[in-house]
Structure formats: C-alpha cells, structure tokens
Image: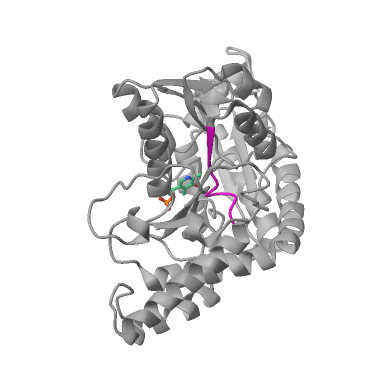
Amino acid sequence: MIYADNAATTKISRAAIDAMLPYMDEFYGNPSSLYDFGQKAKEALEDARSRISACLGCNPRELTFTSGGSEADNQAIRSSAILGARKGKKHIISTAFEHHAVLHTLKALEREGFEITLLDVHENGLVTAEQVRQATRPDTCLVTIMYANNEIGTVQPIWEIGAACREARVLFHTDAVQAAGHLPIDAQAQNIDLLSLSAHKFHGPKGIGALYTRRGAPLESLIEGGAQERGKRAGTENIPAIMGMAAALEESCAHMKENAVKVSALRDKLIAGLSEIPHSILNGDPVNRLPGNVNFCFEGIEGESLLLLLDDKGICASSGSACTSGSLDPSHVLLAIGRPHEVAHGSLRLTINEETTEAEADCLVEAVRDVVAYLRSISPVWRDLESGKAPHII
Ligand SMILES: *Cc1c(COP(=O)(O)O)cnc(C)c1O
C-alpha cells in the first residue's frame, strides 16, 4: 500500500504513542482532583501546554485544548463574532477556499445577521494583504484566513495579512491545521490573534487539538459545564491525547527543516512527472505550497473513478477534501480558483510525507498515468475532445 493522503490524516508516531500510554494505564487520575494522584495528571497537562506553546511562539496561558481543528475553528470564529456583535460590528472577512469548519460556521453566522465577505482568490490559490485591507470596514470584527490550504496546499502571506489586521485593529484568526508541524509558526511575530491546530495532521492522535488566543483577545466557551481550561472549555481533559499531541508536535518541529527539504524535492518530482500527462494542470501555486501537497486536474476524467482504480492498485489518494468525498459536488476550493466544473471534477490530491520513498513516488506517477490513460480510452467525453467535437479547456 502507498499512503498518499496525509492531508486527511497522518500515521500516529511511536513517540506520540509512547507519550500517551502511561497516562492510560498508570496515571489515569483526573487533573481536577485535589489529591496527589490527580495532580500528577495536572502537572502533565501543564507540561504539555508549555511544550506546545514553545512550538507556536506563544504563552502557555494563551492555549486552550479542544477536540480538534473543527472545534477550534468554531470557537475562534464564534468568540470573535460574539465580541463583535457587542460592539455593533457584524462584518467578517474570509475566503472561498476555507475548510468547511470555517465556511459552515460563517454560513451559520450569516443566518444570525452577520455579513460575510469572501475574498476572491487568485488562480494560483493565494489572497493578498492588500485585498484584506480593501475589504476591511469600520464594522469588521474578524478576518479568518487559513494558513495553508488542505486541498491545493497554498500557503498564504500570513505575516502580511496579520499586519494589515493589526493596523486596522481587527481580530485575525488563522486555521493552521495543515501548517502546524510542517511550516514555522510564530503567533506573536506573525500578528495572529487566534490560531487553530489539530494533532492528527502532524502524527499525533485524532480527537485532540488546540486554539491559541492572544492575551486580551476574547474566548467564549461553546460547551457549558466545569471550569476546565480556565472556564473556556468544559469537560475532563483528554490527558493521553494531549501528551501525544505535545510529543508529536515537538518531534515534527525538531525535524521540520530537513523534512521540508526532503519532502518538497519529492513533491516537485511528482509534479514534474504528472505534468507530462497531456491535458493536465497543477492546482495551486508551484512555490508557495505545502512541502507534501500535489494537486492536479486531468481533463475528461471523473475524480471518483480515478480514486477507485488507484485504490485497486493499493494507492490511498483523494480528490480533494476527505469531508466532501462521497458527495458528487466538485471541490469548492477548485471552483474558488476558477476551475470550470467539468475540469474540477477530474481532480486528484496526493499528499506525501517524510516517509514516502523515491520508489513510491515513481510508482505513483506511473499508476496515475496508466489509470488516466485507461479512463480516457473508455470515455465518450474524451472521444469528443480528441475528435475536436468539443474544445479542450486545459
Ligand atoms: C483536518 C482539518 C480541519 C479539521 O480538523 P479536525 O481535527 O479533523 O476536526 C480543519 N481545517 C483544516 C485546514 C484541516 O485540514
């Protein structure tokens, strides 16, 4: 099997598992209990919080644990909206290529009377700080723009966007779920007010994440209950998962540079190989993209058929986001960068990591080339394109 879907989830690391086990079978106390046994769990919790903060360039007091990236996104946006509404500011700026955890939260706020501006995305999958500046109004309460896109891998100019928000005194949230552990993050230096991350995207366990909230920025609890996490997130803390997350993030950050060099070289090799397939196009910026992300559209191909035939060859890939597979709608990200519906339908995302080998990369290119050729050979749409009955788009 070749696993090429690391944007959907990653394999948990040995270090993460080893960090978790003692907190399942030995130190299973509740960190809110007063006796020493519970306090052992409490100490572990605070130790994990400060180690994770060190990787993000923030203070441990600015970090709240959540059940993952989706919850962190929901809480960041809802909290900012509540504060905004109190001040009569009900305008939010975002982009059309955000994760559904962001887009669906914004849709819900729209129904509650907020006005949402989704910035136009350039064909290369990037937005600019200038676009943010132009869209900002006196009643803007939040700008939420993802750090790195989960489908096409593009990395946004976060520092510049943060600076534009700071200048306009508007809160800036970034969904950094794809970036954390893969790209350098310095919440203070990058002018970020709120930032979401999720452990299972950097070799940590599933079901655990965190929200960084700059001191002074608002945080409202989404869950009523106990006073855990300074009253910002009720519920007994998932200590094993939190310990696994800390170990995974530290390990990812320690090897970030060397991994990025290695993985991006392999990524570029994949991009070069797939570009040779006729009527194919790379999605997203060739340079400003995640080290492990490859995303293509192939004309005359159904993404779903491509995935099924790759699966037959033991290849785990995706057509875009794991959240939309199963639905027949083309990716909202590909539509946002201007791909026509019929082209967006033929998309393929391969997301590799530091464990992917050269041999696997060669195998991926060959498999995709063969499957695309086969699907085109049996496609009436392709026959029309080749006979000139319908014009090629790409
Ligand atoms: C995976 C992902 C999420 C959701 O994180 P979960 O921990 O699975 O809830 C949010 N945003 C982006 C960009 C993601 O890739």
Q: Position of residue 134 (x, y in %)?
A: 62, 17
Q: Give the answer, above or below, for where 198 lies relative to 106.
A: below
Decide which of 372, 140 is in the foreground and name it.
Answer: 140
Residue in the image at 51% along x and 18% along y: 138
Q: Position of residue 336 (x, y in %)?
A: 54, 25
The quarter of the displayed image where residue 329 is located: top left
Q: Does 64 lie within the magenta span? A: no
Task: State left or right for residue 100 relative to residue 156.
Answer: left
Residue in the image at 68% along x and 36% along y: 157
Task: State left or right for residue 29 relative to residue 393.
Answer: left
Q: Give the answer, above or below, for where 308 lies relative to 56.
A: above
Q: Does residue 104 appear in the picture of this structure?
A: no
Q: Residue furthest left?
A: 225
Q: Position of residue 231 (x, y in %)?
A: 32, 55
Q: Give the answer, above or below, for where 23 lies relative to 305.
A: below
Q: Which residues are magenta?
A: 171-180
